[in-house]
Image (cartoon, rainbow, N blue to C red):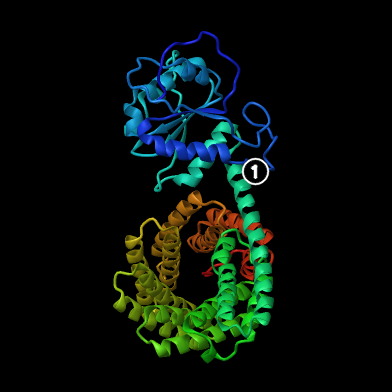
Amino acid sequence: MNKGKNTPNAVPARQYRAFLSYSHTDERAANKLHHWLETYRMPRRLVGTAGRQAGVPPRLTPIFRDRAELPAASSLNEQVHLALSQSEALLVLCSPAARASRWVNAEIALFRKLHPRRPIIAALIEGEPAESFPEALMARDAKGVEHEPIAADFRTDSDGPKLARLKIVAGLTGVPLDQIIQRDAQRQLRRVISVTFVALLLVLLMSAMLVFVARARSEAENQRQQAEGLIEFMLTDLREKLEGVGRLDVLQTVNKRALAYYADQPDLQTLPSDSLERRARILQAMGEDDFKRGDTPEALAQFREAYRVTETLLAASPNEPQRLFAHAQSEFWLGYVDFLRDRNDAALTHFQSYQTLAEKLVRLRPTNRIYWRELGYAQGNICTIALDQERRNDLLQSCKGALDTMLRVQRLEPNDPAIAADLANRHAWMADALRIQGLDRNALMQREKQTAILQALLQRDPKNAGYLQDWMLARYSMSNLLYDLNEIDHARALRAEARADVAQLVARDPANKDWRVWQSKLAKPLAKGVH
């Protein structure tokens, strides 16, 4: 650790952004964090804004880290003392080893003595706080006041490395954490979009190259795989990232280009199986994007073509889980379009086929949580049909089956936020089923369970558009239920909150048809008997 002797009397001017204090048992973690801090660039829009001392700097350098190991020393050396006196903040890596280190405790005590008002940031990298925070970190000052340090928890079940590092940046600069998170996310999004357009240019370039190398079979095959890989990346992985911020318009041009690419290959027999699988996934992704924009005819064309592909693949390998899974998605999307077009009989046929495929997946792979989750989705679709038609005989059974299956999935993966969101939806469906049965108080209990899950998700990721949409819909339904229970003021307050949220969502992405539909519904006054 940071050891030595001699203590100068004067306190020189500030020279270091921070002093990194750690046990040498944690040297690997210290090296990694030190490197990240010294290479991190502040978001451009924050540079020069008001911080703790002056304008926010573009870089967080220099960070002092003592590399000396002097176990025989009896006190902190002069270099360490000088560095502590010249540091704007103290960053302590907390672990059981750090708590046991007399040098870490000595550095904390000296820094607090030299700079009682400068920030001390505790970075928890291992263990619980009680067993990892050095005693000096929690000690009271000369006036008997206990100063709680700024805490950044690197453990995966808490903040995690990414958020913990941004908390440290906030502590060092004095910029509010939410501003840093927002600006950092905007910077990442700009990078992703830039990469997308560069990738699109590459796709166009490779498509042109295919014309010139058509006679070279091996080269043409290589180019085809690269082009398809880029298209799939843009329509699947990238699309998932953009969905989290509620944007549907960015990929519209890419969708059209991908469709043109595959329009030249209508004969399924000419494509290898891996290309067929990729083509089906891309068609489903394109159909989903078109559907969310309100282009139902175009979406239906994509879903039908995907169905043709996945049906062909499944016929060739009827017991292959990957083929079963892919065709299950095709059954779902065609059923979902029929359901939203009020063609419930046609939708039910697709949803029952979807459930049959999911049940077969579970039988083939009984420990696979993804396949159990598909079964929960399939049962939920049957539940939605029953809810829409108010089929009292099998309503509670189908909705309870969907809820029980998703509870089982959560037990298999308790920390997955996507599964938690699915579980919240199942509680909502169960609430609607109970309302149809006239059990409004029981329905309220299910809505409260849904609300608790969504609040936890929003605390974890407050900018997630999907969570915000679910929260808005939950308050819409809760307001209707409370109104029927004659809790009028509470119902009106929830309805007003839901209207404000959907307005923000529509402003974020005006192309999202679903949000505009819900905005119209929320504009209507509360009425008795609305589910």
Relative to 204, residue 319 above or below: below
Asked which secondary structure carries label 1, the reply is loop
Relative depth, front residue between 392 and 272: 272
Relative to 374, residue 473 above or below: above
Residue 240 place in picture, x, y as percent: 55, 64
Name which residue lies at 46% across and 45% down. 161
Q: Is residue 72 left or right of residue 338?
A: left
Q: Quadrant of residue 379?
A: bottom left
Of the 4 image quadrants, the one containing the N terminus is: top left
Q: Is residue 524 visible?
A: no
Q: Quadrant of residue 214?
A: bottom right
Q: Is residue 328 left or right of residue 528?
A: left
Q: Quadrant of residue 234?
A: bottom right
Name which residue lies at 53% across and 26% down. 89
Badge 1, how many Cα within 10 Å: few under 14, some, many 20+?
Answer: some
Going by the numbered disc 1, the residue's amino acid type is Pro
Residue 510 place in picture, x, y as percent: 69, 64
Q: What residue did someone put label 1 on? A: 43
Q: Is residue 76 visible?
A: yes
Name which residue lies at 48% across and 61% down. 485
Relative to 180, residue 224 above or below: below
Relative depth, front residue between 109 and 518: 109
